[in-house]
Image (cartoon, rainbow, N blue to C red):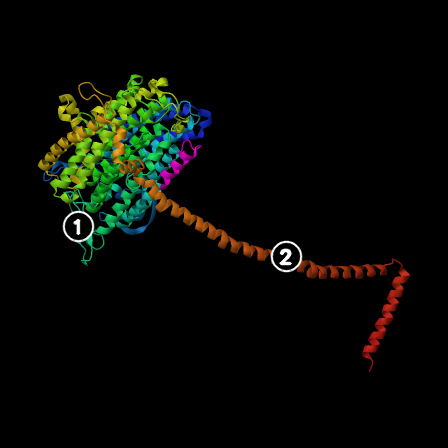
Amino acid sequence: MSWQAGLYVAAVLIPLAAFTIELIGIRLLGRLNAYLATGAIGLSFLLSAVGFIDYFFVEAEGVLASHHPHASAHAEPGAAAEATPAEDSHDEPAEHAKGPLVWRASYDWVIGGSQAVPVVGQIAGPSLVIPLAVHIDNLTVIMFLMVTFIATLIHIYSMGYMHDDPGYPRFFTYLSLFCFSMLGLVASANIFMIFMFWELVGVCSYLLVGFWYEEKKNSNAANKAFIVNRVGDVGMLIGLGLIWTSFGTFDINTINHSLRDKTGRLNVEASAAGDTAVVVLHNQETGQVLKSEGTGKPLQIPFWALTLAGLGIFAGCAGKSAQFPLHVWLPDAMAGPTPVSALIHAATMVAAGVYLVGRFFPLFTPDVQLYIAYTGAVTLFIAATIAAVQTDYKKVLAYSTVSQLGFMMLGLGVGGWSAGLFHLLTHAFFKALLFLGAGSIYHAVHTYEMPVLGGLRKKMPITAYTMLAATLAISGVPLFSGFYSKDAILASSIYFVFGEHNTQHILLFVLPAIGAAITAFYMFRMWFLVFAGEPRGYPAAAHGHDHGGAHGHGDHHHGNPYDHAHESPPIMTWPLMILAVPTIIIGYPFTILPVSTSDIAKPVVERMLEYGEPVVRQVHVESLHQSHLLAMGASVLILAVGVGLGILFYAPPLPYVFRKRQDARLAAERLGGLYGFFVNKWYFDELYDVALVKPTLALARLCSEFDRRVIDAAVNGVAKVTLLLSKAEGIFDRVAVDSLVNLTARTVYSVGDWSRGLQTGRIRNYLMFLAVALVGLFVGVFSWVRP
């Protein structure tokens, strides 16, 4: 095992060790659990930072190494597969000759079966080999740094936010397990391990969303999240089964490097019988067709099987990343503590789905990619329209997450691998900042309702202006991170629709364009309603609903929340200020940075793109450049529309610009039923309630009645008959059997009692009995033998 791989193994195991200690000693450690959990994830961040620097800066100057995709299959059980230097090639472009740097380590902990399944790559191996293996490449390194950095700040923030909560030690115990699960998922080298950590992430989200389980709505939200994700996981299990039966291996690197040729294309041909399409497997490094060891024929997989496997994998990802139609669980997950929302929405659970789509990217056929693109486009549009009419700022952020995840899936679906994952990275920082800012607001005013707030920037300047930075980023304002990642997605969409002449899929550009405008509108709407203008407060006679129970106490439904508002303590504001830095600068184009900074950043950019679009298609540089120019112009125009509407309806009057803002309530009334349609979240919950929940409950009641009236009646009938038979048997036993036995016993006793009278103990009596017996004997004998 290389020391770099060991570094990441340690980064995964440290939170697990912390969780184990916290769980065993939760009563003994008490509030010290928070320091142990925070220190553990902080140490994982430091190890990730060392690995990041070594990967992108130290190794960038040396010879690139690449792990041969089949090396682990040759290794002896328990052997570690080391990264090996790639061979120089002067005939191919550099990116094909050297490939991305990979660190791997594995230990075969399950070995079974016989030499039965031909593993991809002409290697005959056991029919079941499941190693504990890590795979560290450019994507893993970046994800590790992002997850550990954000998780560390959330841990620190939580020490202030959860300070007075009675479940304080338990909360940090769950966080440690959550971080271990996500890091394990990111580092996993095979599908089996990914699925284990995938399910563990779901369990952790269930525990944290339902953290305040005393309230029914919180436990219901946790159940909803868990059940909806299980729906997606059914598809994922089908996909994993098809992958195993098709490839005979769980190793992701082997699978990804066997599907496409050197140009990154799937080689689809007609089968020998000519009745179906098949995918011919290649060694992507050499471009050679892989052949069966026994027959020498090319290894092939039915195209339908690969498509179905891809759809199954995406079904699981759609559940985790809250994609239509499995998006309904994420807004309800706001029932958990706000730091949990920040962790789920930014760095862990929902990021896992997008990450897995990126990791399995070469597996997806064009049909699956198109399905992913449309799913993302529809999701981002639906969620944006719902977010635009919410009055709860935490719900606005929740639907914003769903919408932004749709953007990521759209980018991946249209072939923008680096664009979709770049937006995952930038979104993690500004969404974590937004949710932690939301927690800071609640900590000050104890309400989530925007209409009763206003003017908070005067009392909470740090929260206000850090959230403004995040608002500018997610809205796509130039020079902020979100602008560049969203621009890359729009450019990929434009290139797919127009550059590749897929104008029949124009919706893949129209929907994200509209969604981006709505995003800018609802984010500025939220910021203006909470921080700008004058304080509004509750109407004098209002007694609103409890929107604050999730923090352990209710809203103040009288007076003005502004009166008792205050800036959060430093332990909560410092993470906001730290997150504001990457929110602003992480997306900067490196050409506008100082030369020294650009030189440092250059190897990072080159390494990030090594596994990008060339894996799937050869990109025409000029067309893509034109797409970026068009996307940049479209982004600025879309931003102007969205921000303009936000200012027009919700900004306080500005001198020399406009004297009176438009009445948002009047605009809502003019929208009529459409506004109500959006407020009711497109009636998805009601639809699922009518189409799924109520029929399921009705079927359950029917089964219950059948069980009670038929099965239970039959069982009870048999029981009654058995009882009657047992009673009859009891009577027969007492009257007949017992009486006969008792009669026999009495008779024997009487005979014995009579016989006892013969035993007098006197010799003369015995002599008399003997004489009588002898006389009787002689009489009998002589009577018998008489002639």
Start and end of the magenta stretch? 210-227
Residue lying at the far left of the rendered structure: 622
Amino acid marked by disc 1 = Val
Q: Tag 1: Cα neighbours inside 10 Å, few (<14), some, or many (≥20)?
A: some
Residue position marked by numbered label 2 in the rendering: 727
Q: Secondary structure at mark 1?
A: strand
Instruction: Examine the residues drawn in magenta and state their main secondary structure.
Output: helix
Instruction: Tell me if residue 221 is in the magenta stretch.
Output: yes
Q: Looking at the image, can residue 412 be seen?
A: yes
Q: Nearer the viewer, mark 1 or mark 2?
A: 2
Q: Secondary structure at mark 2?
A: helix
Amino acid marked by disc 2 = Lys
Residue position marked by numbered label 1 in the rendering: 268
Position in image of residue 257 (x %, y %):
21, 43
Give whichever of 589, 116 is nearer the camera: 589
Image-quadrant location for residue 272: bottom left
Instruction: Tell me if residue 403 is in the magenta stretch.
Output: no
Position in image of residue 604 (x %, y %):
19, 29
Image position of 640 with respect to 315: above or below: above
Check if mark 1's residue and mark 2's residue have beta carbons within 8 Å: no
Image position of 29 with respect to 74: above or below: above
* Pointer 1 or 2: first along the chain: 1
